[in-house]
Image (cartoon, helix red, strand yellow):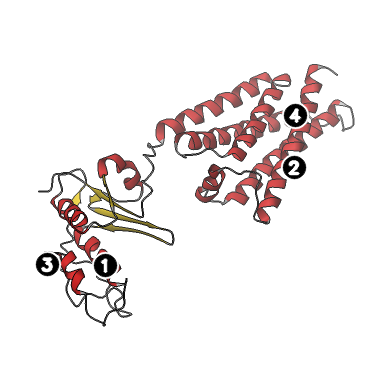
């Protein structure tokens, strides 16, 4: 066999093995398992719009198509197919499919290295399969292979240029207060936290601007509740104080419509908290925690608010 035939045979074998690899991962996921053990694989599965399993099936279809086309090319080279079949169409189909696959891998790889905190090892292994197929394609059509690698590099570059920075990871605390040094409402909330020794970690909002903007938050003070079964974002002094009041009230039973005496000492009078505030208001009535009054006590994070 010449170099071109060796390249085609190797291309066909790798495409078949890659297809089996992906269908094996799909079968494992159907039973709640996975080849990949890294946290990055779980992150990719959560953020993909189509879902992890469907994304794997798309990769399986791409590799199966390459295996089919390269198999037909082998049969033509061995004289097993009708000579009327134009091999140029087979080569063109393989080239287009491979270039499209490398472009997609450039996007996935760029998203991982420029955005995700941890890489998906399974995704990297699939990318390695397509890159190896590109190298093998050099034996058959080096121009198409170079075009595929160039497409991979260009897409990777654009993803890196266009994606905003992910920002630092949030602190590992159950309650995080994002505040600004120029916000008077933040100062009042911090004073209450320090006075009552509440287990809330205050952090400067300027260090987490990108993270909060991705969540649609651009005002302070903002309280992020990061409990195991509860993820809440409360914006403004009034909403935060009402939430803390409700949390304190729910720690022990109390008569309906009343707030414990010690809670009144924790919450300043100007916060608007009164005996009429219930931790769990009756069904159908407005919730004062998440539906505060118009004066919510919040400032733009990048503006001075004395």
Residue highlighted by disc 4: 11
Alpha carbons under labels 3 and 1: distance apart: 16 Å
Residue highlighted by disc 1: 289
Q: Secondary structure at mark 3?
A: helix
Indicate which label's residue lies in the foreground, 4 or 3: 3
Q: Earlier in the sequence, mark 4 or mark 3?
A: 4
What x and y, as percent, mark residue 255? 26, 82
Q: Secondary structure at mark 2?
A: helix
What x and y, as percent, mark residue 143? 64, 20
Q: Which residue is pictured at 29% across the width and 40% down the height?
A: 207
Indicate which label's residue lies in the foreground, 1 or 2: 1
- Quarter residue 78 falls in: top right
Indicate which label's residue lies in the foreground, 1 or 4: 1
Q: Is residue 226 above or below residue 268?
A: above
Residue highlighted by disc 3: 269
Q: Is residue 71 above or below residue 55?
A: above
Indicate which label's residue lies in the foreground, 3 or 1: 3
Position of the N terminus, as image quadrant, is top right
Indicate which label's residue lies in the foreground, 2 or 3: 3
Alpha carbons under labels 1 and 4: distance apart: 62 Å
* Mark 3 Cα-neighbour bin, 10 Å: few <14, some 14–19, many ≥20: few
Residue highlighted by disc 2: 20
Q: Earlier in the sequence, mark 1 or mark 2?
A: 2
Q: Earlier in the sequence, mark 2 or mark 3?
A: 2
Q: Is residue 200 above or below residue 249?
A: above
Question: In the picture provided, is 302 more to the left or to the right than 210?
Answer: left
Q: Residue 142 or 215: which is nearer the viewer?
A: 215
Mark 1 in CB contact with mark 2 (< 8 angstroms): no
Q: Residue 90 or 181: which is nearer the viewer?
A: 181
Question: In the picture provided, is 220 more to the left or to the right than 101?
Answer: left
């Amino acid at each position: 066999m010449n170099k071109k035939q060796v390249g085609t045979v190797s291309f066909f074998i790798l495409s078949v093995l890659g297809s089996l690899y992906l269908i094996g991962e799909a079968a494992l996921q159907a039973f709640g398992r996975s080849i990949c053990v890294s946290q990055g694989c779980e992150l990719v599965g959560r953020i993909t719009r189509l879902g992890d399993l469907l994304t794997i099936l798309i990769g399986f279809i791409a590799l199966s198509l390459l295996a089919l086309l390269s198999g037909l090319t082998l049969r033509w080279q061995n004289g097993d197919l009708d000579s009327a079949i134009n091999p140029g169409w087979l080569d063109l189909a393989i080239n287009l499919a491979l270039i499209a696959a490398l472009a997609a891998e450039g996007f996935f790889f760029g998203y991982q290295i420029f955005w995700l905190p941890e890489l998906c090892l399974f995704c990297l292994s699939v990318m390695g399969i397509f890159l190896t197929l590109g190298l093998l394609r050099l034996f058959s059509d080096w121009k198409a292979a170079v075009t595929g690698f160039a497409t991979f590099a260009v897409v990777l570059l654009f993803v890196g240029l266009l994606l905003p920075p992910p920002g630092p990871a949030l602190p590992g605390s159950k309650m995080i207060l994002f505040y600004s040094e120029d916000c008077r409402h933040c100062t009042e909330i911090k004073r209450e936290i320090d006075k009552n020794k509440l287990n809330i970690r205050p952090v400067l909002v300027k260090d987490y601007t990108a993270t909060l903007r991705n969540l649609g938050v651009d005002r302070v003070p903002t309280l992020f509740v990061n409990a195991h079964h509860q993820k809440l974002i409360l914006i403004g002094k009034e909403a935060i104080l009402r939430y803390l009041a409700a949390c304190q009230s729910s720690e022990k039973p109390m008569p309906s419509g009343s707030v414990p005496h010690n809670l009144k000492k924790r919450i300043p009078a100007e916060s608007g908290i009164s005996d009429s505030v219930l931790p769990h208001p009756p069904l159908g009535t407005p919730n004062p925690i998440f539906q505060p009054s118009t004066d919510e006590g919040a400032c733009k994070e990048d503006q001075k608010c004395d």
